[in-house]
Image (cartoon, rainbow, N blue to C red):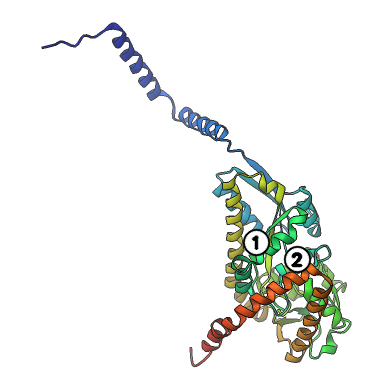
């Protein structure tokens, strides 16, 4: 039988291994954790996984329910999904730039992201209004369908490209309310001389109906209505309107929101900053935007009804429906405005045609699906 020949170098090697193993066992837990962190950091560095810090500016007061919670959620989700590699600090209206300065700040790169509504920028880009709401146009479900599966988002991206901006849907309010008034609206004559906060295309309709439309950011609305700077205002719906306290200074709450049947909010990203991100962080930004977009609609769907109950039952708000002939008058004016704007603005015209084409497909189908179901569930006893 052959005996094992323990050569001295092998014995020395085994002894060294024992020392190393024993040493590793007595290293404290925190040292181990620190080592792991250092190794992870080094691995991230070696793999080129840079970290990024972005600023997000919004048109809403900081942490305002619904609208203002979407950018916060977006930033939190991006942080969690990227494992902290993309940090986004959220600034409310007026903290870094005024509400109406969001487009310019993100376009210039002063901030990398913005959250607001495309129709606020109609003075710069009239066609941007399609990407918030068209009076008597698509509802929330249809807007999301048009943007994400009907070519709408591509048109929006083309529209914003010259401003170095990449737009994404960043929230959806559902059908809004027509607004808060201190006098009843019984005929079209009641709109004459009415000074009302109503942005976008809806505002243009009011102007042509004899009123005066103004665009005032949300945070300044209460004071404007209280001091008589405006006679009436629309904002969003019961959940958000209750938070602003409009019921304290206005008597009538009118519906439906003919001017904003399914408003989409926007997340705008500075394109240059976006293109500097690795592909996985770009995907995270897009995914977090889709999440914020759907989440807002879910929240409004759950909370608007309770808020309306509180407004009516606890605060004595008088709920009113706009008369059909007033609605028909506004609709007629809206069609004229859309056609006239399209005739003088090729960009507006191109998007208007695409929008109408989608409407012509989705409306007939929704007549026999969504609309038919709404009517069906009202039949018989519950
Ligand atoms: Ca509104």
Location of residue 128 in the rendering, given as x and y in whole percent from the top left corner: 75, 66
Query: Which residue appears at 15% of the width and 10% of the height?
Result: 3
Q: Nearer the viewer, residue 363 or 171?
A: 363
Secondary structure under tag 1 reads strand
Query: Which residue appears at 53% of the width and 84% of the height?
Result: 373
User: Number of labelled discs?
Assistant: 2
| Mark drawn on residue 244 | none
Task: Check the image and name the residue furthest to the bottom.
Answer: 380
**Residue 238 located left or right of residue 77:** right
> Foreground mark, 1 or 2?
2
Which image quadrant is residue 244 in?
bottom right
Location of residue 311 in the rendering, given as x and y in whole percent from the top left corner: 67, 77
- In space, the residues marked 1 and 2 are separated at their CA atoms by 15 Å
Task: Check the image and name the residue furthest to the left.
Answer: 1
Q: Residues within 10 Å of mark 2 (few under 14, many from 20)?
A: many
Vertical arrangement, residue 192 with respect to residue 158, above or below: below
Vertical arrangement, residue 25 with respect to residue 15, above or below: below
Question: What residue does disc 2 label?
Answer: 128
Location of residue 15 in the rendering, given as x and y in whole percent from the top left corner: 32, 13
Which image quadrant is residue 196 in?
bottom right
| Mark drawn on residue 170 | 1
Q: Is mark 2 within 8 Å of ligand 1?
A: no
Q: Nearer the viewer, residue 294 or 318?
A: 294
Query: Which residue appears at 77% of the width and 72% of the height?
Result: 349
Location of residue 35 in the rendering, given as x and y in whole percent from the top left corner: 49, 28
Query: Which residue appears at 36% of the width and 21% of the height?
Result: 21
Confirm whether residue 66 shows in the render: no
């Amino acid at each position: 039988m052959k005996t094992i020949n323990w050569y001295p170098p092998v014995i020395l090697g085994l002894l060294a291994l024992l020392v190393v193993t024993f040493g590793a066992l007595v290293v404290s837990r925190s040292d181990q954790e620190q080592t792991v962190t250092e190794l992870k950091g080094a691995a991230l560095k070696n793999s080129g996984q840079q970290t990024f810090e972005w600023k997000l500016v919004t048109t809403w007061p900081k942490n305002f329910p619904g609208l203002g919670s979407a950018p916060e959620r977006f930033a939190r989700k991006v942080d969690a999904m990227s494992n902290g590699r993309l940090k986004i600090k959220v600034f409310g209206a007026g903290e870094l730039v005024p509400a109406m300065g969001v487009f310019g700040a993100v376009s210039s790169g002063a901030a990398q992201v913005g959250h607001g509504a495309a129709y606020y920028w109609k003075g710069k880009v009239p066609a941007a209004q399609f990407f918030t709401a068209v009076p008597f146009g698509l509802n929330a479900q249809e807007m999301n369908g048009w943007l994400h599966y009907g070519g709408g988002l591509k048109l929006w991206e083309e529209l914003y490209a010259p401003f170095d901006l990449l737009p994404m849907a960043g929230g959806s309010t559902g059908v809004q309310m027509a607004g808060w008034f201190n006098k009843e609206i019984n005929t079209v004559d009641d709109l004459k001389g009415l000074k009302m906060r109503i942005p976008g295309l809806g505002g243009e309709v009011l102007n042509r109906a004899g009123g005066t439309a103004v665009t005032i950011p949300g945070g300044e609305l209460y004071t404007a209505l209280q001091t008589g700077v405006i006679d009436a205002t629309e904002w969003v719906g019961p959940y958000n309107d209750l938070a602003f306290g409009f019921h304290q200074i206005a008597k009538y709450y009118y519906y439906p929101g003919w001017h904003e049947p399914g408003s989409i909010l926007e997340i705008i990203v500075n394109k240059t900053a976006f293109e500097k991100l690795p592909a996985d962080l770009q995907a995270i930004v897009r995914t977090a935007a889709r999440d914020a977009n759907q989440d807002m609609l879910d929240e409004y769907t759950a909370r608007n009804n309770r808020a309306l109950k509180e407004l009516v039952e606890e605060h004595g708000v008088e709920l009113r429906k706009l008369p059909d002939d007033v609605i028909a008058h506004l609709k007629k004016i809206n069609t004229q405005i859309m056609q006239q704007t399209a005739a003088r603005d090729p960009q507006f015209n191109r998007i208007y045609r695409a929008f109408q084409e989608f409407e012509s497909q989705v409306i007939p189908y929704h007549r026999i699906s969504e609309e038919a179901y709404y009517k069906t569930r009202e039949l018989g006893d519950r």
